[in-house]
Image: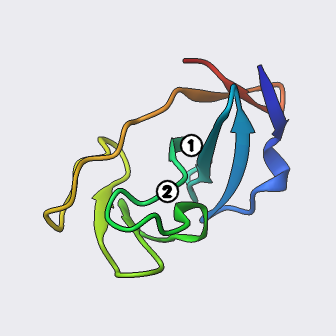
């Protein structure tokens, strides 16, 4: 399922997409790689699509909880994030569960 063009997301930022009844936070890393997680922080529902990226760390905008961008593992004692399958195909973000 195509979510949209990769160019919609500037490098180092995220965007929210709704697919199959779920809202996802999709990030385009400065390397060009795409990463996706559920859009709500498991701590208090903060909007993870608005999270900051620092190197390989995702930082929630509400309470600054942190997760590893590669694994979704918490670095601040919160529940881990589910890593959701997305990839780039011909300039498009493709959801691939």
Q: Is residue 54 left or right of residue 12?
A: left
In the foreground, 54 or 14: 14
In the foreground, 13 or 45: 45
Res 86 seen here: yes
Colouring of the image: rainbow
Q: Is residue 3 above or below residue 61?
A: above
Query: Which numbered circle lies on residue 33?
Result: 1
Res 55 seen here: no
Residue 4, image x, y percentages: 85, 38
Quadrant of the rendered structure where residue 54 is? bottom left
The residue identified by callout 2 is 40
Q: Residue at x 42, y 72 (%)?
A: 60
Q: Residue at x 37, y 37 (%)?
A: 82
Q: Is residue 71 left or right of residue 41?
A: left
Name the image quarter holding the N terminus.
Answer: top right
Residue 51, image x, y percentages: 52, 70
Question: Does dot 2 land on a helix, a strand or a loop?
Answer: loop
Name the image quarter holding the C terminus.
Answer: top right
Dot 2 or dot 1, earlier in sequence:
1
In the foreground, 40 or 26: 40
Quick one: label 1, few (<14), some, or many (20+) residues within 10 Å? few
Q: Is residue 34 above or below residue 42?
A: above
Q: Residue at x 20, y 60 (%)?
A: 78
Question: Does dot 1 land on a helix, a strand or a loop?
Answer: loop
Q: Is residue 11 left or right of residue 73?
A: right
């Amino acid at each position: 399922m195509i979510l949209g063009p990769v160019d919609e997301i500037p490098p180092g930022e995220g965007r929210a997409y709704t697919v199959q009844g779920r809202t996802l936070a999709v990030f385009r890393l400065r390397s060009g790689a795409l990463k996706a997680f559920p859009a709500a922080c498991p701590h208090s529902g903060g909007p993870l699509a608005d999270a900051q990226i620092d190197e390989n760390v995702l930082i929630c905008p509400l309470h600054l909880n942190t997760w590893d961008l590669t694994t979704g593992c918490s670095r601040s004692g919160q529940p881990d994030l589910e890593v959701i399958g997305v990839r780039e195909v011909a300039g498009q973000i493709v959801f691939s569960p």
